[in-house]
Amino acid sequence: MPGRTVARHGRISARHARGFGAAVIAVAALIAAANAGPARASDAAPAAHQTARHR
């Protein structure tokens, strides 16, 4: 095939390098999102909970 390139001497092609780089970035983003944790509550007192009575 005329458009096909072959990696020589142990080097990877630019296409594979971009794919590998994108995979590394995706994994890093997933790890960062998993370690983010929940947001902290503010120091202000919470609003009183009001129950609605339906009749």
Image (spheres, rainbow, N blue to C red):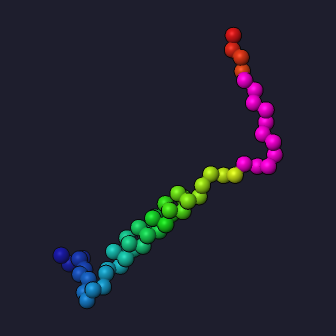
Residue drawn where x is 23% and y is 77% of the image: 4
Farthest-out residue, top: 55
In this rendering, the answer to whether 44 lies above or below 24 is above
Measured as percent of width and height from the top left, residue 20 is found at: 38, 72
Residue at the image position 33 percent from the left and 74 percent from the top: 16
Magenta residues? 41-51
1 falls in the magenta region: no
Residue pictured at 59% horizontal, 58% vertical: 36
Q: Quadrant of the N terminus?
A: bottom left
Where residue 47 appears, as percent x and y from the top left, is 79, 36
Of residue 17 and residue 30, the one placed in the foreground of this image is 30
Point 71% across, 17% down: residue: 53
Identify the residue at the far right of this view: 44
Identify whether 43 is placed above or below 28: above
The percent coordinates of residue 54 (x first, y second) are 69, 14
**Which one is nearer the viewer's eye here, 37 or 24?**
37
Q: Nearer the viewer, residue 16 or 28?
A: 28
Determine which quarter of the picture holds residue 33: bottom right
The reply to whether the magenta stretch includes residue 48 is yes
The quadrant of the rendering that contains the C terminus is top right
Quarter of the view holding residue 48:
top right
Residue 26 or residue 4, whichever sits in front: 26
The majority secondary structure of the magenta stretch comes to: loop
Q: Position of residue 6 (x, y in %)?
A: 23, 81
The reply, left or right, for residue 6 in relation to residue 33 is left
